[in-house]
Amino acid sequence: MIFVSGEVGRDHTGAIVTGGFEVEVRQCFENIRYALERAGAGLGDVVRITAYLTDLSLYPVYSKVRGETFGADWPASATVGVAGLLLGAKLEVDAVAVVAVAP
């Protein structure tokens, strides 16, 4: 099992990306993809995600990008409304992936 702790839509400098919420969501999922790759896994190995949104009215945008990222068979997920996130992020996502180990 691989646990990716909360990722936000920050760039290589550590700042939240600019360009709107959809750009932030895409960067967040890109950061998760990168973390999984470094652990020998990919987005197809993700079985569970939890999203934290500072504004639940943004859920449709998040849901659209999640669907594009994972396809029709996205992992089990939960979305939670929160008062605030670090760095002024509007979204944070953590993930759990399962990778088969060769005998």
Image (cartoon, rainbow, N blue to C red):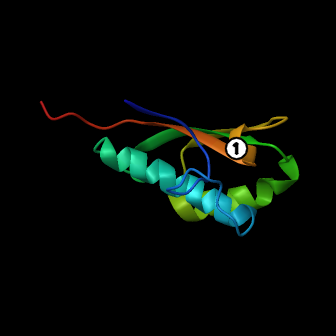
In the image, residue 65 above or below residue 15: below
Left or right: residue 2 compared with residue 83: left
Residue plotted at (57% across, 59% down): 27
Q: Pointer 1: what residue?
A: 87
Left or right: residue 55 compared with residue 24: right
In the image, residue 95 above or below residue 44: above
Q: Nearer the viewer, residue 40 or 102?
A: 40
- Residue most extreme to the bottom: 19
Q: Quadrant of residue 45?
A: top left
On the image, the x and y values in percent for residue 51 come to 67, 41
On the image, the x and y values in percent for residue 9 come to 61, 53
Residue plotted at (74% across, 38% down): 85
Q: Secondary structure at mark 1?
A: helix
Left or right: residue 97 compared with residue 88: left
Position of the N terminus by quadrant: top left
Q: Three-letter amino acid code at disc 1?
A: Leu
